Image (cartoon, rainbow, N blue to C red):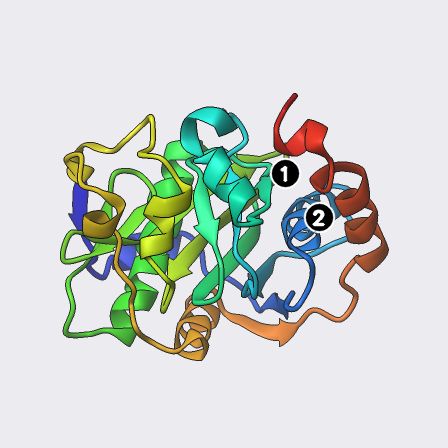
């Protein structure tokens, strides 16, 4: 499935966001970065938080498996061990990714309603990916930005962003990564070919399938903040809960390798 990004006023009218919060969760250990997403989701679900757009940029290289991924199938574990590349697991689905300098990660914590654009997994994918794609198109107006598969963003058929979601009763977490200036050859070194592939990939290698946007992180962040009307910085991020969850869950072998 491939969908060229086009303005859709009807979809935009479905939900006009009042001012959302935004926050930069940078320069933290990987376990805390990953725990921050789940903490914010739980925080909102329990009535303590507000809709938020979160950003973070890794400074070290590490693997992040999707919730249901088998590490031994998706990851070149011997290569990771030989080069000291740690392996983590996130709370949402989707495929395994390699993180590092040159990646920009974002997370949206959004409220769901029974009749709104986030009412189902499919509806949320379509609504959020269209809005995110339009934001990137505004940064690269001469490029062909498309939604491919269900939650990939591509430029001229090559993937620069993968995304996934986790849903609770009232809020969802939708997050993903933008490849901006990442060391792409490392992907094939530490990750195996994914066991599940979208049709549009056509069995292309990591090197032939992935591409960097080659734009500053600040430009992408500004475009997403504008798209989601995230104008106010979050002032009371739940640091103690995030650090506790990182210790109890995201730093453990039992969670990361699902032993």
* 195 on left or right of 247: left
Q: Residue at x 41, y 67 (%)?
A: 227
Relative height, residue 4 to residue 59 (above, below): above
Q: Nearer the viewer, mark 1 or mark 2?
A: 2
Residue under label 2, please give it.
44
Q: Are marks 1 and 2 in contact (CB under 8 Å)?
A: yes
Q: Residue at x 36, y 35 (%)?
A: 192
What is the spatial separation of the Cα atoms under label 1 and label 2, in whole angstroms? 8 Å
Q: Residue 115 or 6: which is nearer the viewer?
A: 6
Percent across and percent down for residue 4 are 16, 53
Circle 2 Cα neighbour tier, 10 Å, few/some/many (<14 / 14–19 / ≥20): many
Circle 1 Cα neighbour tier, 10 Å, few/some/many (<14 / 14–19 / ≥20): some
Choose the circle earlier in sequence order: 1 or 2.
Answer: 2
Q: Residue at x 53, y 44 (%)?
A: 82
Percent across and percent down for residue 132 are 36, 59
Relative height, residue 147 to residue 248 (above, below): below
Q: Residue 230 or 15: which is nearer the viewer?
A: 230
User: Looking at the image, can residue 222 be seen?
Assistant: yes
Q: Secondary structure beneath disc 1?
A: loop
Residue under label 1, please give it.
170
* 54 on left or right of 147: right
Q: Residue 54 or 231: which is nearer the viewer?
A: 54
User: Looking at the image, can residue 115 be seen?
Assistant: no
Percent across and percent down for residue 209 are 21, 48
Q: Residue furthest front?
A: 82
Q: Residue at x 56, y 45 (%)?
A: 173
């Amino acid at each position: 499935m491939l969908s060229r990004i086009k303005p859709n006023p009807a979809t935009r009218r479905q939900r006009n966001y009042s001012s959302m919060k935004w926050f930069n969760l940078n320069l933290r250990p990987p376990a805390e970065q990953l725990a921050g997403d789940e903490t914010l989701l739980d925080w909102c679900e329990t009535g303590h938080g507000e809709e938020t757009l979160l950003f973070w940029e890794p400074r070290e290289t590490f693997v992040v498996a999707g919730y249901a991924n088998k590490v031994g199938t998706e990851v070149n574990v011997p290569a990771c061990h030989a080069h000291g590349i740690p392996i983590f697991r996130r709370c949402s689905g989707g495929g395994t990714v390699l993180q590092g300098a040159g990646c920009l990660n974002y997370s949206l914590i959004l409220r769901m309603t029974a009749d709104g654009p986030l009412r189902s997994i499919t509806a949320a994918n379509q609504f959020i990916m269209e809005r995110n794609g339009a934001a990137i198109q505004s940064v690269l107006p001469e490029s062909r930005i498309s939604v491919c598969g269900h939650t990939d963003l591509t430029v001229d058929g090559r993937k620069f962003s993968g995304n996934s979601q986790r849903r609770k009763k009232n809020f969802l977490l939708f997050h993903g990564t933008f490849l901006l200036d990442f060391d792409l050859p490392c992907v094939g070194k530490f990750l195996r070919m994914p066991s599940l592939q979208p049709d549009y990939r056509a069995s292309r290698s990591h090197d032939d399938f992935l591409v960097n946007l080659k734009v500053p992180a600040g430009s992408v962040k500004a475009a997403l903040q504008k798209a989601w009307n995230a104008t106010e910085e979050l002032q009371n991020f739940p640091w103690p809960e995030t650090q506790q969850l990182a210790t109890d869950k995201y730093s453990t072998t039992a969670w990361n390798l699902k032993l």
